[in-house]
């Protein structure tokens, strides 16, 4: 018997050999009965959440009797005229997308929106495969649900595609619909970001912990998936890898379920540290964007900044992790891709060019939430606490860890206090009194810095 292929409306081709077995294996683990589909819902329709749902739909959507994939997003978000015009250009540049919309009798509304005769809404275009934060990358059509209770109440797997700043509030709402549940769902969080809590002692709260606190779902059922990747490139079949982190019971079967030829998913037990690192690199990506714009993309200036920001990240990982060396590769890879093409670096560039201002907020049309802004505030607050004091290498006196992180301090002044312009990032880099980045790394490696309490561990 030959290999069976299925063609999809976005032009991708899936080989179904082995896919049904992967669904059956996961269904068996979850105790699903015949005729009861595995229900997967992505909550939040930003770029990564939408791509994640679309990848699952492309891969497993053909097995409708065994799996149901849906995505929830809020109603009422209008698509502005400029975006509608650009969307129309994207549609007409892709013959496969154009034919699909005509076949679905959906093309005319995009013509009317282009002419200004109709207003499109984000949930409406998502059904046709267009994510508002990623218009240039058409996805496959998606089953969109706008009623949160309907989306989540009986879901077996919930994907958290929300920004970290919205995660707690939304999952508190979701928990109301789970009061009658007998079995707890599995939750895969894609969110990168942190909250700082100062009582009863300074510590970090990550999105998976927020979900646990908001819903009561046990930590063994909550996982984090992240890696050095750009959502649009992953959907366009660029080779990528990611890690799914959490309890072994679920991370290994989910890694197998999610793995594709061009999207390799490894698994790791270190949930919280990988989440924190995902938030940390966003902090320094904003500064990298500023430096790039202010120096006209000077390779030399960007490398100087990279040396300083990586030394600060290494310093901070020594505070957070007992074996920080294990994090060096994943953290640097994630930082590198974010500096190259991430929205946080883009945001830094726009600030430096004067096209955006910090007082405009951190939710940007066409880009979504800039996670690095809240992360700057959280890391600064946390590392300013005197209870975490470390010995200053030259002054030989105790100082808060943030005093050894001049780039983080400067980003806080620019983004949170708003008392400095983007130019301050260059001044911080060029400060004659600034230590050699190597010395900061040596300090971290030669002192017993590790603070388990920062990650809420005893």
Image (spheres, rainbow, N blue to C red):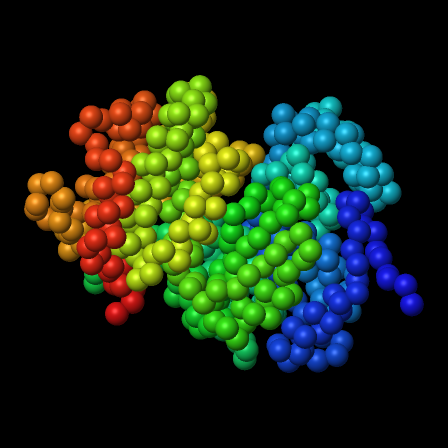
Residue in front for this viewpoint, 252 or 46: 252
Residue in front for this viewpoint, 294 or 264: 264
Q: Residue furthest right?
A: 1
Query: In the displayed structure, does residue 194 sit left or right of residue 55?
Result: left
Q: Quadrant of the C terminus?
A: bottom left
Q: Residue at x 77, y 45 (%)?
A: 10
Q: Quadrant of the N terminus?
A: bottom right
Residue 338 location (% of width, % of height): 48, 40
Residue 228 location (% of width, % of height): 52, 47
Camera sees residue 105: no
Q: Quadrant of residue 358?
A: top left
Residue in front for this viewpoint, 442 or 308: 442
Q: Residue at x 62, y 78 (%)?
A: 29
Image mark count: 0
Q: Residue at x 30, y 43 (%)?
A: 312
* 443 relative to 268, above or below: above
Q: Quadrant of residue 168?
A: bottom left
Query: In the displayed structure, does residue 116 sit left or right of residue 293?
Result: right
Residue 257 location (% of width, % of height): 64, 65
Q: Residue at x 71, y 66 (%)?
A: 67
* 296 relative to 142, above or below: above
Residue 279 location (% of width, % of height): 40, 48
Residue in front for this viewpoint, 18 or 31: 18
Query: In the displayed structure, does residue 416 sit left or right of residue 360?
Result: left
Camera sees residue 316: yes
């Amino acid at each position: 018997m030959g290999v069976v292929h299925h063609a999809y409306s976005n032009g991708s081709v899936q080989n179904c050999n082995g896919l049904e077995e992967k669904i059956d294996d996961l269904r068996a683990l979850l105790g699903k009965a015949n005729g009861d589909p595995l229900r997967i819902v992505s909550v939040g329709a930003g770029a990564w959440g939408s791509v994640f749902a679309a990848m699952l739909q492309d891969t497993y959507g053909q097995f409708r009797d065994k799996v149901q994939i849906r995505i929830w997003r809020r109603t009422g978000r209008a698509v502005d005229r400029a975006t509608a015009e650009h969307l129309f250009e994207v549609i007409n540049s892709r013959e496969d997308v154009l034919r699909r919309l005509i076949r679905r009798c959906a093309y005319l509304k995009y013509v009317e929106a282009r002419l200004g005769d109709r207003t499109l809404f984000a949930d409406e275009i998502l059904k046709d495969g267009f994510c508002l934060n990623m218009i240039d990358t058409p996805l496959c059509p998606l089953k969109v649900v706008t009623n949160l209770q309907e989306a989540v109440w009986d879901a077996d797997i919930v994907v958290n595609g929300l920004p970290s700043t919205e995660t707690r509030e939304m999952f508190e709402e979701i928990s109301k619909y789970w009061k009658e549940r007998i079995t707890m769902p599995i939750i895969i969080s894609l969110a990168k970001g942190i909250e700082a809590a100062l009582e009863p002692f300074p510590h970090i709260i990550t999105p998976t912990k927020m979900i646990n606190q908001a819903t009561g779902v046990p930590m063994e059922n909550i996982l984090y998936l992240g890696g050095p990747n750009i959502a649009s490139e992953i959907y366009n079949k660029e080779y990528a890898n990611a890690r799914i982190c959490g309890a072994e019971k679920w991370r290994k079967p989910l890694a197998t379920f999610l793995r594709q030829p061009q999207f390799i998913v490894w698994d790791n037990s270190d949930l919280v540290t990988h989440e924190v690192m995902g938030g940390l690199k966003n902090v320094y990506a904003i500064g990298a964007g500023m430096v790039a714009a202010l120096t006209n993309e000077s390779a030399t200036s960007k490398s100087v900044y990279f040396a300083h920001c990586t030394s600060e990240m290494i310093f901070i990982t020594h505070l957070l992790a007992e074996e920080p060396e294990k994090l060096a590769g994943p953290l640097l890879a994630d930082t590198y891709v974010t500096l190259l093409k991430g929205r946080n670096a883009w945001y830094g560039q726009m600030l430096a060019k004067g096209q955006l201002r910090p007082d405009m907020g951190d939710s940007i049309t066409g880009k979504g939430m800039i996670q690095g802004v809240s992360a700057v505030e959280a890391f600064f607050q946390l590392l300013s606490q005197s209870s975490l004091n470390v010995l200053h290498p030259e002054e030989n006196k105790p100082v808060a860890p943030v005093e050894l992180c001049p780039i983080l301090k400067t980003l806080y002044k620019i983004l949170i206090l708003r008392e400095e312009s983007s130019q301050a990032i260059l001044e911080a880099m060029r400060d004659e009194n600034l230590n050699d980045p190597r010395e900061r790394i040596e300090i971290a490696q030669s002192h017993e810095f590790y603070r388990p309490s920062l990650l809420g561990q005893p």
